[in-house]
Amino acid sequence: MKRRLTRALLHVLITLPAALVWSVPGQAAESPFSAAVNVSVGWEDNIALIADERDKIDAAVTRVGVDLRYQLVQTTTYELDASVTPFYEWVSDVEDLSNYGATVGLGLRGAFAPDFTAPWYSVGLDYTITRFEDSDPRDGDWIDVELALGKRFTPLFGIHGGYRYQQRWQEDDDPVCVTGGCAPQFNWLIDEVFDLERHGAFLHADLTPVESTNVFVEYSFWNGDVGVAGRGAVPNVAVVDDLALEGYDGSPGIFRVWRTDADQHVVELGTSRRLTDRMSVELSAMYLWTSDVNNEISEDDYENTVVTLSFTFEM
């Protein structure tokens, strides 16, 4: 069933961009179709989310995405659009974690009054298909939902926040075992390592100190499933050998990934600037950490720092 759904969605991803392009009126003053290319380079100090500080893997990450967007409805108080975003992400040092895929999305945004200081709302729904270079257990599909409320207090300052939901389905349910074989009675554990579900809340504030420049800060809190990687003994939870990390640094010991419940905290600070009418740049830094791991094994806690520089070119 999952594979049939994946094939159907891939068919949509291939045909929808062409349909959107052909639907654009050639002489329209304002086309409902828009396209943008985003290129980002970044660095993560714990790319595999490893619990033990001694085994953390840092890597540079380069990502290229093409955002194709079509405005379905536009009124004076709300707008609805559809989007398709194919992407490729290259991970240095651990190239098996490089991945590609596409996101199909619907977004609704509206205001409660025409005035720019009126409260506004947004609803977002995204479906993402991701395939990794050589890490079959990580292949999977994501659903992301976001419900937000916001308000601009002045032309220079605004805040918004709301609720987020994520669910992930592991595409390949065939277990990958290196050590000790795969006993049938434990296959259910292996099958569910990357089947993840979590809920979250966030608060975002942005400031425009000078023209064309924006500064933002965001805090988000998540509760639910997380994947943790490490060497050696692991708790009695869903676990699988992680071949993508095996021998990456020549060190002995097999990496494993296990699923557990935890709280996750994320703080992000960034700034963006429009360089031209069609080009913008953004620099951001994000720090995340886990707490209150459900199985009470302190070694499950992990941290990750991500620094990203991205350029967006509107077409």
Image (spheres, grey):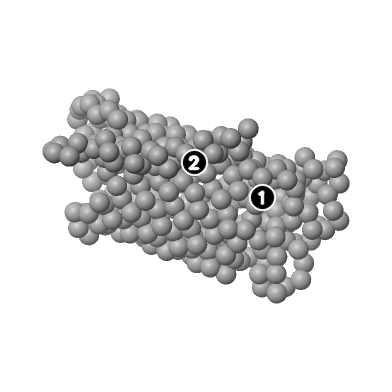
Position in image of residue 239 (x %, y %): 75, 49
Alpha carbons under labels 2 and 1: distance apart: 19 Å
Quadrant hosting residue 313? bottom left
Is 61 left or right of 260, judged from the image as shown? left
Res 10 label? 2
- Extreme residue toward the bottom, this view: 250
Q: Mark 1 highlights which residue?
A: 137
- Does the CB distance between marks 2 and 1 fall below 8 Å? no
Q: The disc labelled 2 sits on which kind of residue?
A: Leu
Against 210, residue 67 (above or below) is above
Point out the image quarter for the N terminus.
Answer: top right
Could you tell me which secondary element the residue under label 2 belongs to? helix
Q: Residues within 10 Å of mark 2 (few under 14, many from 20)?
A: some
Residue found 72% across the figure and 73% down from its top: 251
Is 313 left or right of 40, judged from the image as shown? left
Q: The disc labelled 1 sits on which kind of residue?
A: Pro
Residue found 70% across the figure and 53% down from its top: 257
Position in image of residue 92 (x %, y %): 53, 68
Residue found 33% across the figure and 54% down from its top: 37
Is 187 left or right of 290, judged from the image as shown? right
Against 99, residue 27 (above or below) is above
Position in image of residue 79 (x %, y %): 28, 30
Q: Nearer the viewer, residue 148 or 210?
A: 148
The answer to which of marks 2 and 1 sits earlier in the sequence is 2
Position in image of residue 30 (x %, y %): 17, 38
